[in-house]
Image (cartoon, helix red, strand yellow):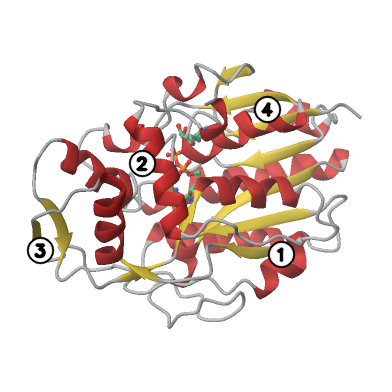
Amino acid sequence: MTDRILITGGAGFIGANIAAALIAEQQAEVVIVDDFSSGDWRNLIHVDCEVRAADADDPAILEEIADGGFKAVFHEAAITDTTVMDQRLMMEVNTNAFANILEASDYSGTRVVYASSAGTYGNSPAPNQIGSGEIPENIYGFSKLAMDRVAARWYGQHSAPIIGLRYFNVYGPGEHHKNERDGNKTASMMLQLYQRAKSGQPLRLFKYGEQMRDFVYIRDVIGANLAALSASESGVCNVGSGLARSFNDVVSILGNSLNQSFDIEYFDNPFTFYQNHTQADLTETKRLLNWQPEWSLEKGMSDYVKLLETGHRGPALTV
Ligand SMILES: NC(=O)c1ccc[n+]([C@@H]2O[C@H](COP(=O)([O-])OP(=O)(O)OC[C@H]3O[C@@H](n4cnc5c(N)ncnc54)[C@H](O)[C@@H]3O)[C@@H](O)[C@H]2O)c1
């Protein structure tokens, strides 16, 4: 079988980082399919691979998967703006396309590693554990839970492992485009706060910055994806740091990294749904992937800020 690897959504933040890592660390031949609805060509300037502009479940792509054209598929393509409310559109793009990819990959015994989300847990009490509190608060989270359920129906029957990774709040190089689209800024708070700090504006946080999130650095997300290439069975697991930290912590670490102190404007949270406390339980992650995170928030933010200070944009491993 070929060593070509397909990455859907490869012009996006996480997909481009996986592509760059596969090329740099494993010398794999990478093919990217992306409809460029939210991704950015600038992520791929230094990622030397074949790029196709198409839907993730374009018939020609599905045929190539079914024919055994790829050793593995990393499925990252999705509507990633969690404030999109069009239910049918969200389900078609996120869930239906994934079901089509699983069906095609069964013909050829192709491994599929796909992006699920901590959004599947909604506001259930942390730590968030696979199989409990899976009560999403919006259609985005539901579309990801529906993907996990589609995958689970294939467990034990599919001709290759299917590995779902529930990413928590990912931050790191390659996410600039998420702050540059019309209307919504969806990049991590690390980048949003950094950009405000650099432009001399006060930092803005929802009252009173005490919400807790599991922030996971992109280099750990890459590590989890590469580990999933060797997982021997199907399953879904969390990909986080394993710790919950507050937005006030993020501001204070940013201040230390830039050697600066900030004015903070606290304002009312306009969202009716909002995850106030997430934290990944990593028990199933260690079992399924034989992997654990290595980047603390302090270490990850320091690495990220150093890259930002050099003007770097694009995936981590193209540095
Ligand atoms: N970044 C996070 O914190 C986070 C957290 C949880 C889950 N995720 C999931 O990880 C995956 C990658 O997210 P990201 O942060 O890189 O977002 P992103 O928006 O940067 O990347 C998504 C990519 O998918 C592409 N795309 C969208 N619809 C498509 C379609 N129908 N066909 C082909 N390409 C399509 C977009 O153009 C974009 O390049 C997504 O599935 C997302 O739901 C991300």
Q: How far apart are marks 4 and 2 (CA)?
A: 22 Å
**Residue 131 position within the rendered picture, expressed as x and y whole percent measured from the top left:** 61, 78
Q: Mark 2 points at which residue?
A: 305
Distance in Å between CA atoms under marks 2 and 1: 39 Å
Residue 57 is at least partly visible in this image? no
* Residue behind mark 3: 266
Q: What residue type is labelled 2?
A: Val
Residue 283 numbered tag: none
Which residue: 13% across, 53% down? 262
Q: Earlier in the sequence, mark 4 or mark 3?
A: 4
Real-space Cα distance between discs 2 and 3?
23 Å
In the rendered view, would you say 129 is above or below 60? below
Numbered disc 1: secondary structure: helix
Q: In terms of sequence position, does the residue under pointer 4 or pointer 1 come before the other?
A: 4
* Disc 2 secondary structure class: helix
The residue where tag 4 is placed is: 24
| In this view, the mark in front (2 or 1) | 2
Cβ–Cβ under 8 Å for marks 2 and 1 = no
